[in-house]
């Protein structure tokens, strides 16, 4: 599961600038929405900081709930069947 998470995070990191710009968000605006700092978003986009799983989940929620980016998540291999499996496993473990 760790390898799958890494791949999903890498795909999100690679495509974050495109997804952010599709919603017409600045780095500051995105940071405010996900509860982060502009500096963190900037470092993630520049690949100087590794995105955490929690940041990834926040971004997936944001982009999945917007018509402009929801389909892109699937096309960019970010919202995959593997991702759905991880979420279901975590849900089942908490029950």
Image (cartoon, rainbow, N blue to C red):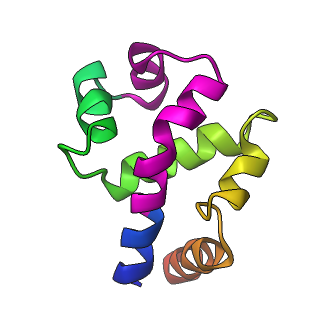
- Residue drawn at (75%, 45%) of the image: 70
Name the residue rendered at 49%, 24% in the picture.
Answer: 33
Single out the residue that lies furthest toward the left: 48
Residue 31 highlighted magenta (yes or no): yes
Task: Give the residue drawn at x 52%, y 42%.
Answer: 59
- Above or below residue 54? Residue 30 is above
Residue 78: x, y in percent? 58, 60
Vertical side of 4 occupied by 31: above or below = above
Q: Is residue 53 above or below residue 37?
A: below
Query: What range of the chain is rendered magenta?
Result: 9-35
Q: Residue furthest right?
A: 67
Query: How many numbered marks are there?
Result: 0
Pick the quarter of the image with the N terminus: bottom left
The quarter of the rendered structure image containing the C terminus is bottom right
State which quadrant residue 2 falls in: bottom left
Left or right: 65 in relation to 48: right
Answer left or right for 44 relative to 94. Answer: left
Q: Residue at x 47, y 65 (%)?
A: 8
Q: In the rendered structure, does residue 36 fall within the stretch colored magenta? A: no
Query: Which residue is nearer to you in this view: 75 or 93?
Result: 75
Towards the viewer: 23 or 56: 23
Q: Residue 50's x, y, as percent?
A: 24, 52
**Where residue 72 sits in the image (x, y, percent)?**
71, 48
Report the magenta stretch's main SS.
Answer: helix
Residue 10 percent coordinates (x, y)? 39, 60
């Amino acid at each position: 599961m760790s390898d799958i998470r890494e791949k999903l995070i890498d795909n999100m990191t690679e495509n974050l600038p495109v997804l952010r710009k599709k919603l017409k968000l600045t780095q500051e605006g995105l940071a405010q929405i996900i509860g982060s700092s502009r500096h963190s978003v900037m470092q993630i986009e520049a690949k100087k900081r590794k995105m955490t799983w929690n940041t990834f989940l926040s971004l997936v929620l944001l982009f999945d709930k917007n018509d402009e980016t929801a389909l892109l998540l699937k096309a960019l291999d970010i919202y995959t069947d593997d991702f759905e499996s991880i979420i279901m496993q975590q849900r089942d473990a908490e029950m």
